């Protein structure tokens, strides 16, 4: 049924569709629906407390006996630059004044953490079939501990060099994340400002460079995209934006409305919310912060300066300071429950992959 089976067999799934684990936006309900439909459902766990992580993972386990994926950021500790913090405070201060907020925090506390020993021990307890990482890998002993416990490990690469690094580090499959992708770029080795490689160029080069299965990600929204990924040599796809329109997605009304009206040319990469580049709908705040390409505090420190602005904007329902993450193919989204979306995707891909279609 599928032209390449290495990923399907490795993960123990039926269809080579990985639902992208998305920080605040994916939910246990979404992951359960996708895994039960034969794909790999997943949950972005980076913003969760340990208790929440355990409770949500147990909820997925109760909802499906199929494999699922828990996902974590693996970023380095942010550096402390008092001068950069001060310069950033000065840059955002006019926006705070405009929104009637009190003074900019000295150094905000971000609600996101890197992969820690405590998270590892929860995972060793829960034992999902798959753990995936973004922004590189955690230290080698942690990767080994997960492998020893029977976990398969996936990680995003945005260049051939990153893919080679991950393959050498023992990752079981590589997510080749193209420039079109919604959300944060997984970049961990190269400069991310100027060297974005698109999915069409990245996937076949990664396939040629590594011996593990490659999962194509970025701008894949329907069966045509899935078939194209296979034509490029991928063994599966990871799709995020397409699942954002599902009722199971944890997004606000403004985000949902933006997806319904999305265009191909309205997103851009920005570091203005988190400190790391992410693809989101362009906005007045993003424009202003991009003007002089000035340095910003490391991920996740920057959240501390941008969160209060985002929160007011969300309450007011204006989009000037909202962080509306989605990719370049969002206009192809369908408002369907995740199980139905899976059915459509599988059917469309099968048709597109048929000889003579
Ligand atoms: C709203 C949103 C949140 C995301 N959060 C995460 C995350 O927490 N971890 C992760 O590995 N990838 C995350 N991603 C990136 C996806 O894994 C994937 O690379 C991307 O969605 C693929 O491109 P597409 O959005 O065009 O399908 C996110 C993507 C979106 C759209």
Image (spheres, rainbow, N blue to C red):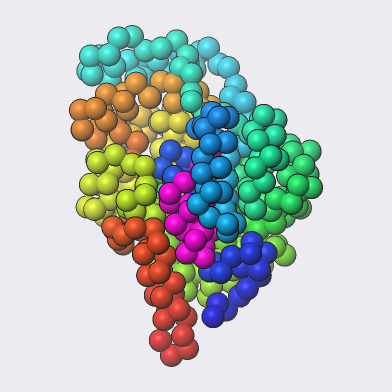
Residue at figure coordinates x 62%, y 37% from the top left: 74
211 lies left or right of 267: right
Q: Residue 272: image x %, image y %?
A: 40, 31
- Is 333 placed above or below 284 here? below
Residue ranking furthest to the bottom: 356
Q: Is residue 218 visible?
A: no
- Is 315 placed above or below 91 here? below
Please give the range of residues in magenta.
Answer: 28-45
- Is 345 placed above or below 217 here? below
> Along the line of sight, which residue is nearer the eye, 182 or 223?
223
Residue at figure coordinates x 62%, y 26% from the top left: 77
> Along the line of sight, which residue is nearer the eye, 76 or 200?
76
Q: Is 13 within the magenta?
A: no
Q: Is 33 within the magenta?
A: yes
Q: Residue 342: image x %, image y %?
A: 42, 65
Task: Name the image quarter holding the C terminus.
Answer: bottom left
Q: Residue 98: image x %, image y %?
A: 22, 18
Task: Name the image quarter holding the N terminus.
Answer: bottom right
């Amino acid at each position: 049924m599928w032209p390449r089976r290495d990923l399907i067999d490795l993960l123990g799934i039926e269809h080579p569709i990985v639902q992208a684990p998305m920080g605040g936006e994916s939910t246990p309900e979404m992951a359960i629906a996708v895994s039960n439909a034969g794909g790999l459902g997943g949950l972005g766990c980076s913003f969760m407390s340990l208790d929440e992580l355990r409770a949500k993972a147990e909820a997925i386990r109760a909802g499906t006996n199929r494999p699922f994926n828990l996902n974590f950021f693996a970023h380095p500790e942010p550096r402390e630059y008092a001068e950069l913090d001060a310069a950033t405070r000065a840059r955002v201060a006019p926006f705070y004044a405009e929104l009637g907020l009190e003074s900019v925090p000295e150094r905000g506390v971000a609600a996101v953490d890197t992969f820690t020993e405590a998270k590892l021990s929860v995972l060793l307890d829960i034992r999902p079939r798959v753990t995936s990482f973004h922004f590189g890998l955690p230290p080698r002993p942690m990767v080994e501990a997960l492998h020893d416990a029977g976990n398969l490990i996936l990680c995003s690469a945005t260049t051939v060099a990153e893919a080679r690094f991950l393959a050498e580090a023992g990752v079981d499959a590589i997510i080749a994340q193209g420039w079109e992708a919604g959300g944060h770029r997984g970049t961990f080795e190269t400069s991310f400002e100027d060297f974005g490689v698109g999915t069409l160029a990245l996937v076949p080069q990664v396939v040629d460079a590594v011996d593990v299965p490659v999962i194509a990600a970025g701008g894949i929204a329907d069966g045509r995209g899935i078939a194209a990924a296979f034509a490029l040599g991928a063994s599966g796809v990871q799709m995020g934006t397409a699942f954002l329109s599902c009722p199971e997605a944890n997004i606000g009304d403004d985000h949902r409305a933006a997806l319904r009206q999305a265009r191909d040319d309205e997103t851009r990469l920005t570091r203005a919310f988190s400190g790391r580049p992410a693809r989101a709908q362009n906005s007045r705040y993003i424009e202003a912060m991009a003007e002089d390409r000035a340095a910003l505090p490391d991920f996740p420190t920057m959240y501390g300066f941008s969160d209060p602005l985002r929160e007011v904007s969300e309450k007011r329902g204006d989009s000037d300071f909202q962080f509306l993450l989605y990719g370049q193919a969002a206009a192809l989204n369908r408002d369907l429950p995740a199980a139905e979306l899976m059915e459509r995707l599988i059917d469309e891909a099968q048709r597109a992959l048929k000889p003579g279609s």
